[in-house]
Amino acid sequence: MEEGKTIELNKVLLLADGDNITVGNPLIDGARIMATSQGELKDDKIIVLKYKRKVHYRNKTGHRQIHTKITIDRILKPGETVAAPKRTRRTKKLVTKETPVDAQAETPVDTMKEETSSGT
């Protein structure tokens, strides 16, 4: 998962706000958690060893599980909504094309014709 991406987790088992505790059965309907991804990282290597005695069978493999690190931004109770960020509109840039008069009079093609005709 990309770093900085916003995630919405909707499987909430328990909400606690001071002395007010809400327990789901099994989940709390409408409760959500807003989180931000901090990137992915690998866990420590787990070594798996298969062994059978008397037949000289040994198989050793390793595995590293990838985990996503998240930061909890907001916990929303059932019925609570998140205010969407206000989108700013881009303004159009004014582009003016100005062509100098001297540049149109003398072009590289015209100068090449003069040099070749005078040389032969």
Image (tube, grey):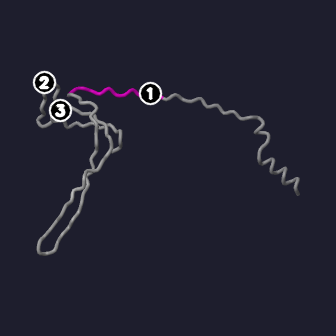
> Which image quadrant for residue 27?
top left
Graded by Cα atoms within 10 Å as few (under 14), some (14 to 19) or many (20 or more), the crowding at tag 2 reads few
Secondary structure type for disc 3: loop
Residue at the image position 87 percent from the left and 55 percent from the top: 119
Residue stretch in magenta: 78-89
Seen from this angle, which residue lies furthest bottom?
55
Q: CA distance from mark 1 to mark 3?
A: 34 Å
Three-letter code, disc 1: Thr
Pointer 3 residue: 29
- Inspect the image, locate mark 3, and give the three-letter code of the amino acid beneath it: Asp
Left or right, 96 with reference to 66: right
CB-based contact (under 8 Å), mark 2 and mark 3: no
User: At numbered mark 1, what does the secondary structure look like: helix, strand or loop?
Assistant: loop
As helix, strand or loop, the secondary structure at mark 2 comes to loop
**Sequence-earlier tag: 2 or 3:** 2
> Which label belongs to residue 88?
1
On screen, 55 above or below 99?
A: below
* Residue 69 position in % (x across, y down): 28, 42
- Decide whether the magenta segment is chiefly helix, strand or loop: loop
Q: Quadrant of the C terminus?
A: bottom right
User: What residue did someone put label 2 on?
Assistant: 19
Quarter of the figure that contains the N terminus: top left
Residue 43, labelled with which disc?
A: none
Q: Measured from the top left, where is residue 74 in percent x and y?
A: 26, 30
